[in-house]
Image (tube, helix red, strand yellow):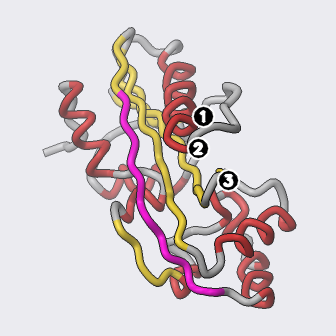
Amino acid sequence: MIILASASPRRKELLEQIGCTFNCETSNAEEVKTGIPQEVVMANALIKAKDIAAKHKDTLVIGADTVVALDDAVYGKPKDTEDAFSMLKTLSGKRHFVYTGLALVYNDKVWQDFAVTQVDMADMSDVEIKAYIKTGEPMDKAGSYAVQGKIAIFIKALSGSYSNVVGLPLHKLYQLAQKAGFSLLNI
């Protein structure tokens, strides 16, 4: 049995896309908010996975956490529309990086890794940012945007895993599961 320790509909869709059979459970554990991006996402992925794994013996639990980083700033989900505006204004016209940490927990065993993807965003006017925020799309996404959504017209280039920017680096997850001795495929 596999459990995805996430409430993210995008992570759920990505696992369904590859034909993985799993259940979802949401962790309410306290997360790390500050630090080096790859350390933050790996710590949070592990916190989520361990929280759910503590309730399920002999079950593979997948934890994931995604942030957007620009210079020394790390952006998670926006608190409100003003926070979303501030994030998008900062990212507009800039190259930034999306980090997703992965943690697989099976009983007392842990496997971890992370993925990083470079994203080049086009300039967005204040009017365009406000219109995008009005759609509601940015409100539950790291960095206040959904690469697979309406903001796609402002993504000039992406280098690395597309699924990482969506919230779950599928190839990295597949490699980590193989290393742990598990298959995500129902074939």
| The N terminus, quarter of image | top left
For label 1, the SS is loop
Picture coordinates of residue 186, whole percent (x, y): 19, 43
Mark 1 and mark 3 in contact (Cβ < 8 Å)? no
Q: Which residue is mark 3?
A: 73
Which numbered circle lies on residue 7? 2
Q: Earlier in the sequence, mark 3 or mark 1?
A: 1
Identify residue type, mark 1. Thr
Number of numbered discs present?
Answer: 3
Boundaries of the magenta span: 112-123
Identify residue type, mark 3. Ala
| The C terminus, quarter of image | top left
For label 2, the SS is loop
- The prevailing secondary structure element of the residues shown in magenta is strand
Q: CA distance from mark 1 to mark 2?
A: 5 Å
Asked whether, in this view, residue 42 is left or right of residue 172, the answer is right
